Image (cartoon, rainbow, N blue to C red):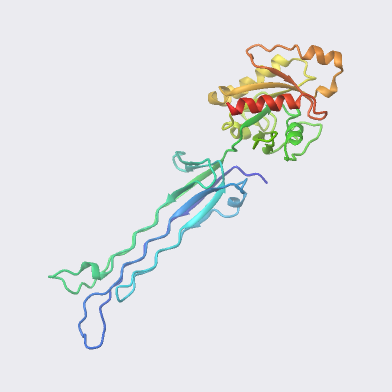
Amino acid sequence: MFIDYTKIYVKAGNGGAGQVAFRREKYVPKGGPAGGDGGNGGNVIIEAHHNLHTLLDFRYKRNYTAEDGQKGGSSLKDGKSGNHLIIKVPVGTIIKDAGTDEVLFDLDTDGKKFVVCKGGKGGRGNSKFATPTLQAPRFAEPGTPGEEKEIVLELKLIADIGLVGFPNAGKSTLISSISEARPKIADYPFTTLEPNLGIVKYKDFAGFVIADIPGIIEGAHHGKGLGLKFLKHIERTRILLIMIDVSSEDYQKDYDTLLNELESYSSELAKKKKIVTLTKADLVDEDELKKIKKTKLKHYKDKLFVISAVSQFGLSELLDYLWEQISN
């Protein structure tokens, strides 16, 4: 199950208390203060990991607490510091303060870490309070409490190209044809119920990543359909590949509707570079295909592609162009 939003409580470890102790050795009946310091509490650290792809685990565990520092010992022995608690999340996870919605950190690369709560400091033992006028202090310092807070984890996928289109526009078929991703494909709307990532191997190069999200319908920015929930997953992409079914009665209307939904959701999303492709070319004959290739869209000046993911028609040309754009 794909989960991209969760709220959890995190608390760092408390610092251990300092010790009150005195030297107790043979022939030294009145030894000086020898209480050790308490150990520091462990931090709570959140780390991005490339092998994780959902926040599902946080549905079942909501509270996370790092280890407390140990109390100081006698004979000037300091207490052991608590172990840090490392919480691993998918790359692309944003950490927010649950109370203010402030973005605390963006874990946008593999291995990136953020100390979300710092552990408390260990208290000083009585040996640290000895002075010429107070040679036998009988008090020590308590440890300080570790930080605690409620945070939101929000996952936004990271990809080079995001697929945008109405339900059943052929997005899932395309991503399954050019990558190893295997989303569910069927001839009805909303087959895709969660975002999918596909890694496209391009010739001898490393390739690029494509994100497929559920189809957008008119009114998606108001919460209609599934679009609003998943549009955030293409906010990080560099290019939007807009896909329109070749059997549509009005390409311009479809294009304008999709642009309006993008603009209404996010002005930054609407500013991204867009490439338009007409899909399912295998469903029309050659004469009709020639007419379709001459299609012009208002407010679109880039190259218009006509493809069929099923028959592979036009895919090579499209991939060459996509690689050229993301390589610049």
Q: Quadrant of residue 251?
A: top right
274 or 137: nearer the viewer: 274
Quadrant showing the C terminus: top right
Q: Quadrant of residue 261?
A: top right
294 or 37: nearer the viewer: 294
Q: Is residue 246 above or below residue 65?
A: above
Query: Residue at the spot x=68%, y=36% of the render?
Result: 204
208 or 273: nearer the viewer: 208
223 or 120: nearer the viewer: 120
Q: Is residue 76 left or right of residue 41?
A: left
Query: Residue at the spot x=40%, y=64% of the render?
Result: 81
Q: Residue furthest front?
A: 204
Q: Quadrant of residue 61?
A: bottom right
Instruction: Examine the rendering and report whether any part of residue 271 can be seen.
Output: yes
Q: Is residue 101 above or below residue 278?
A: below
Residue 152, position as x, y percentages in the image: 51, 44
Q: Is residue 20 above or below residue 28?
A: above
Residue 297, position as x, y percentages in the image: 68, 13
Q: How many marks?
A: 0
Q: Is residue 129 left or right of residue 317?
A: left
Residue 296, position as x, y percentages in the image: 70, 11
